[in-house]
Amino acid sequence: MKATILFALLINFLLIAAQSKSNLTIGTTADKNLKIIYKDSKYSLQDQSVTFQMQSPGTYPLVIYQLQSVNGNREYKKVYNGNIKLTAGKHMEIAVLRFGKIVWDEADIVADDWNETYQNPASTNGGNSINNYPVATDKQFANIKAAISGEYYDGDKIKMAKVVLKEILLSAVQIKELINLLYSDEEKLVLAKYAYDYCNEKYAYNLVANTLYYSENKKKLLDYIATK
């Protein structure tokens, strides 16, 4: 009986809290990364959406960047820069469509008794977060690839990769090209592990894993990624 009463009180608490707070979800319908600045804090979306729960109602500045191909180069383009108004008891959803169009929706917050702990995303403020690095242009990648291929031994190629892969992100296909510059499958595994943090398409890293010849090394890479 006591447990039932406590559970009922918890549900009532959640309902009251939901009525006085707001939720905000920002996402995309495409497989393109987003970067956002919300309440002057920076966030890089690793998945296709992110939700900020139990927000205080009010008007807040919001900037959204979408990864797009501009004149043959992949770069983050600003698709929204303005203010949003969060209303008590409402859940606002903002979706960025494939080509950067913004659509909005809003509905009442429904209390979720399965989720008693609210964990909002951590910001990447600080300027030195890998997620804040720019994506390499075609010219930059060509220079990176030339620097690595200019070395003869695999060990030296890896050392050069650790020098040139600084403060920049690469696509999974670009990393695959770098991996294929090496001869030894073991050394390919070393570089594949290192380059994972510098990939802006982690969901497509299976392309890199498939460059490994031995199934054991592929498994080692997948096990490594699973721990990240």
Image (tube, helix red, strand yellow):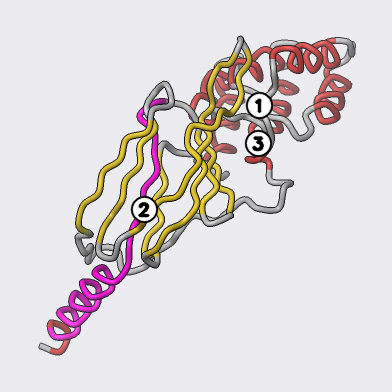
Q: In screen coordinates, is 211 left or right of 3?
A: right
> Residue 135, labelled with which disc?
1
Q: Is residue 21 magenta?
A: yes
Question: Which element type, helix, strand or loop, lies under badge 2?
Answer: strand
Q: Amino acid at mark 1?
A: Val
Whether residue 183 is visible: no
Indicate which label's residue lies in the foreground, 2 or 3: 2
Q: In screen coordinates, is 180 left or right of 155?
A: left
Q: Amino acid at mark 3?
A: Asp
Q: What is the span of residues highlighted in magenta in the rendered image?
A: 5-30
> Residue 23, labelled with which disc?
none
Q: Which residue is mark 3?
A: 197
**Cα separation between marks 3 and 1:** 13 Å
Residue 40, quarter of picture: bottom right
Which is nearer the N-term, disc 3 or disc 1?
A: 1
Front-most of 3 and 113? Answer: 113
Q: Is residue 17 magenta?
A: yes
Q: In screen coordinates, is 195 left or right of 8?
A: right
**Cα separation between marks 1 and 2:** 27 Å
Q: Which residue is mark 2?
A: 24
Residue 138, quarter of picture: top right
- Residue in view at x 40 percent, y 44 percent: 26
Q: Residues within 10 Å of mark 2 (few under 14, many from 20)?
A: some
Q: Is residue 168 above or below residue 210?
A: below
Q: Amino acid at mark 2?
A: Leu
Q: Position of residue 74 (x, y in %)?
A: 60, 19
Q: Find out whether the residues at labels 2 and 3 contact each other: C-beta distance under 8 Å.
A: no
Question: Which element type, helix, strand or loop, lies under badge 3?
Answer: loop
Which is nearer the N-term, disc 1 or disc 2?
A: 2
Q: Position of residue 16 (x, y in %)?
A: 23, 75
